Amino acid sequence: MKTKDVARCLVLAYPAQGHINPMIQFSKRLAHKGINITLVTALSFWNQTKTNNNNNDNNFLFSPNIHSESISDGYDDGGHLAASSIEIYKDTFWKVGRKTLSDLIRKLMVGNYNNNPVDCVIYDSFMPWALDVAKEFGILGAVFCTQPCAVNNIYFHVHKNLIELPLSESEYSLPGMVKLLAHELPSFLYEYGSYPGYFDIVTGQFSNVHKADWVLANTFYELEQEVIEWLSKIWPLNTIGPCIPSMYLDERLQEDKDYGISIHNQNIDACIKWLNDKPKSSVIYVSFGSMAGPTEKQTEELAYALKISNHYFMWVVRASEQNKLPKGTFMEDSALLEKGLIVTWCPQLQVLTHDAVGCFISHCGWNSTLEALCLGVPMIAMPVWSDQITNAKYVKDVWNMGLKVVVDEVEGVAKRETILDCIKEMMESEKGNEIRENAMKWKNLAKDSVDEGGSSDKNIEEFVSKLAQYAA
Ligand code: UDP
């Protein structure tokens, strides 16, 4: 018979920045509500963050209720970059991960946590095998979706063979969603065959979802109402987002410090100092997240558009992407140096909160989109691949919180004049002000959803209370 009264969750994050960030925030929320958390990801990822964050014991977690562990993805020295392809990485990780996760749970069941064994595995939907492992141990399993429900719905339809591939229709109508043109579906479908490894991961996410006790989604009811209602008919769905540090959603917590973790070096002070003397809403913040990168040609078009716009800009160009920046004297141009700051990584949430930032040119990764939305920052969407394509459609046409740069069909890039038009429209026109006001509306709705009694807060409370009952 169990004697404990505190539930323990093992939270398994996929080893990528955009996946671990929301799971850390969700873990913190659960820990705050009294749940013990064992936060797990691949050893390769922890190793990279330790090197870059001067942090040997992961004490960034700032909570006595959270401790970290690792499993092997089969590539302890380098993660997916050490594998010759994503397909090979996936096959190895899925095999090795299953075993090392089982070993870890066994260790936790008999080791130091004897009086507080694992009750529930909360796992990233990219790794459905973790649910099978949880069930082998007879414990609860909750799938955590790091992408919006609209995108989950699309991939679920592909998994069920309800969308024929390669795509043959020009337009798609899925339940609970606006009509999408074929090229507004995630790139793995529209450009079928382009990334087979990722295609298998995203379309396999919900292969065993019928066995899950919960489906937790990093979104909120008010944002995706119709598709959430549709998916709730077939899944035990709970929206629990936006999972961003609570200090950005609750002014009373502004003194808290939470920069999360990063596999990149960042100079927090330099970025904020640079923003501090810029006028209100005068800076364009540009970032393509942690994985995607525009092509060299696209980078050049963007660089010129930023320069010609004559607005201030802060542009994150990761170290691995710097070679795409225009060559020659372009980067030494004094006008450019005066107006722009190019960094390899920045504290994005702090930047987006800064008064000086007027808009966000973004690849529309789901975290970046949610962060902009929660902080009321209008976006100029420049999606690169994956779900970013669909997120960009929603940003512009459904949530009306941004513009979208149109790609020239002949040249295959968004040209500098097109980007410049979007910048002017956002920074200098009445339409830009309307979008800005609308972004503020979303900011308030996002905050309400996680405030006490809000839609996501209620779902988290319910989840926590069911876990506590189970553990008692
Ligand atoms: N990010 C950051 N600093 C940067 C660029 C990105 O902290 O300079 C964070 C950003 O706040 C977000 C994550 O990295 O939480 C990127 O996730 P997203 O889903 O937007 O894109 P992905 O990297 O998965 O493509």
Image (cartoon, grey):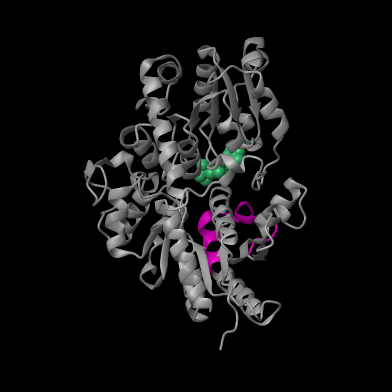
x, y percent for residue 320: 64, 37
For residue 215, which quarter of the picture? Answer: bottom left
- In percent of the image, x 53 and y 26: which residue is there? 299
Q: Nearer the viewer, residue 171 or 86?
A: 171
Which segment is the magenta one? 74-94
Image quadrant holding the N terminus, namely: bottom right
Does any portion of residue 18 appear in the rendered image? Answer: yes
Q: Taking 426 as reference, is 347 above or below it?
A: below
User: Compared to 107, does 345 lie above or below?
Assistant: above
| Residue pictured at 71% horizontal, 77% vertical | 112
State the residue in front, 348 or 410.
348
Q: Main secondary structure of the magenta part?
A: helix
Left or right: residue 68 compared with residue 228? right
Q: Is residue 87 magenta?
A: yes
Where does residue 167 sit, x and y in percent of width and height? Answer: 27, 48
Q: How many marks?
A: 0
Q: Is residue 468 above or below residue 52?
A: below
Q: Which residue occupies the foreground of this view, 267 or 438?
A: 438
Judge by depth and name the residue closer to the eye, 364 or 329. 364
Q: Position of residue 227 (x, y in %)?
A: 30, 51
The answer, for residue 290, to whether it is visible in the render is: no
Instruction: Please state the quadrant of the image where ligand 1 appears.
Output: top right
Residue 52, placed above or below residue 235: above
289 magenta-colored: no
Left or right: where 127 falls relative to 20: left
Q: Position of residue 468 (x, y in %)?
A: 51, 72
Q: Is residue 148 left or right of residue 100?
A: left
